[in-house]
Amino acid sequence: MFSYRLPALLFISTFVLTPLATANCPSWTPAQAQQEISTLRQRIAVWDRSYHRDATSMVADELYDQAQQQLQIWQGCFTDADADPAPTAATALQSARGSLALPYSQMGLSKLSETALKQWMQQHDDLWVQPKVDGVAVTLLYENGQLTQMLSRGDGLTGQNWLMHAQAIAAIPQHLQTQQATLTLQGDLYLQQPQHIQARTGGSNARSQVAGLLNRQQLSASEGQTIGLFVWEWPDGPPTMSERLTELQRLGFVDSHTYSRPLQDFAEAKHWRNHWYNSALPFASDGVVIKQSQRTINYPRSPYPPVWAVALKYPLQQALTSVTHVTFNIGRSGRITPIAHLKAVRLDDKTIRKVSLGSLTKLKKLALNTGDHVAIALSGHAIPQLKEVVWRSPQQQSIKLPSAENYHALSCWQASPDCQQQFLARLTWLSDKKTLNMHGIGAQTWQALLDAKYISQLTDWLVLSAEDLASLPSFAKKRSLQTAQAFTQAKSQSFARWLKALGAPPAVTPKATDNWQILSALTEQEWQQQRHLSRNYAQHARAFFQHPEVQAVAVNLQKHGISGF
């Protein structure tokens, strides 16, 4: 259902820290707070105009809700006692108004947490549950059985007449067999998607596609065939839910009957939410609606959500948080991976504090800066991904990028301030079980030796003894002996393993009779003709064996009597 969005347009001119300024409150100056709150308020206002006036959603509902919550928190931390109260929905969404009054308001539903829903259900009885269809809300008005109006939701009180589109949508009957003089139906126009599973594919931009069709001057019959109708309310219909559903089915609104279930308790509400979230439906949905069977509509044009129906959303697919800083992991091959560090946020059952951006290219495409507010999702319900920048902080700070040209497969063969990460990655690869197989030695061991200045060149560890290692505070006697034994064992590894440990191109496969001198003497043409490498691989092999830093390592290995050197 087209959930109601109330924009926060309250302008706060002077900010004073309130008792709510706990650990959740930013440590901003009044001027900074004014900037941040004003920026977010303006962003929400833009979303509201697009959503209500143009029926186009610029941001996912769950991100919108979190942004609204964030705004409320900030306003609770920094308030102005003299500020005017926030405007009502009717005045805040003037641009969404149409020329026609809705016979019954469509103010959306309060979205409750599981705890709040339990309490709500204890105070209401004779309850039903339906999927919360992710579509474009409309009001259908029939007079003496003939469709006379299809009104857009507008600002919830007035909307536009979309009757000309109704004629092209086969799911909307033009005439009903009813004795009721005036009949009003509220529902959602949805994109028909047979076998749509929300948990697998999410909303898939379905609502926006329908909104785009409805915003056209003319809707073709073929386009109308793609749109379905889910009637979720009959405000002037029979008094009980079962009666309304039976009559709706008779009138041809089958979805309403098919996807409505009576509820006994909260456990059943959770069951149906999980069932519809993971089952194939003909439409996208973003939660469930729990409503009373008999509801009193005393205020048909109330500017507030109804008290007899509430929503329980599906588990969040995206969480809103902000970027605190960005670091860069530089791997053994010189690949640079930006890591965005985040204000901790919960998504599913995980607490997410950082996310890999994959590459400098993606970082540049996002134009990401420190302070930006971003959407985080889980790929395959496991790996966090940064999906988009939702809005930018007015206090954002640019990120200094490393020079990509300084890092490649043949860079960083010794310790230096700019080479710490890649050099450590080279050492860690040396001890990997796929290379020299130094049991018990990993990045922590190498980092300890680097911090102690015991290693500055790639092969300095070859001369370290157990006594040398025991002098380090972090190395007990047992650890020193085990590390020295692993170093000794590594010296006896084969020439092929040593080449792999040094980072020789994967295409280089030495023969039993090969040694360093033979391979380093091969020309690019010989790599192609004698070793059957492609031109590209031959170039990489030649570059590796001829690189001065690699040759210096080879000379040192020869001095230590390593096989093949």
Image: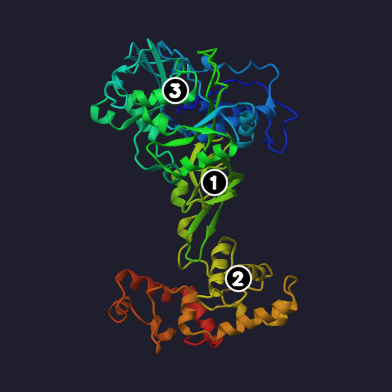
Question: Which percent across, then down, holds residue 552?
Answer: 51, 78
Disc 3 secondary structure class = helix
- Would you place residue 197 above or below residue 477 in this image? above
Q: Which label number is shown at residue 399?
A: 1
In this view of the protein, which residue sits in the foreground, 389 or 543? Answer: 389
Q: Which label number is shown at residue 442?
A: 2
Front tag of 3 and 1: 3
- Would you place residue 108 above or below residue 386 in this image? above
Disc 3 and disc 1 in contact, CB within 8 angstroms: no
Q: Amino acid at mark 1?
A: Ile
Q: Amino acid at mark 3?
A: Arg
Marks 2/3: CA–CA distance:
68 Å
- Would you place residue 401 above or below residue 14 in this image? below
What residue appears at the point 47 percent right and 48 percent down from the top-left corner? 363
How many other residues sit within 10 Å of disc 2, few (<14), some (14-19) or many (≥20)?
some
Residue tagged by mark 3?
Answer: 244
Q: Amino acid at mark 2?
A: Gly
Marks 3/1: CA–CA distance:
59 Å
Give the farthest residue toward the left: 221
Question: Which percent across, then down, holds residue 46?
Answer: 48, 26
What residue appears at the point 52 percent right and 60 percent down from the top-left corner? 330
For the question of whether residue 316 can be seen, the reply is: no
As drawn, is 480 to the left or to the right of 406? right
Mark 1 or mark 2, which is nearer the start of the sequence? 1
As drawn, is 444 to the left or to the right of 314? right
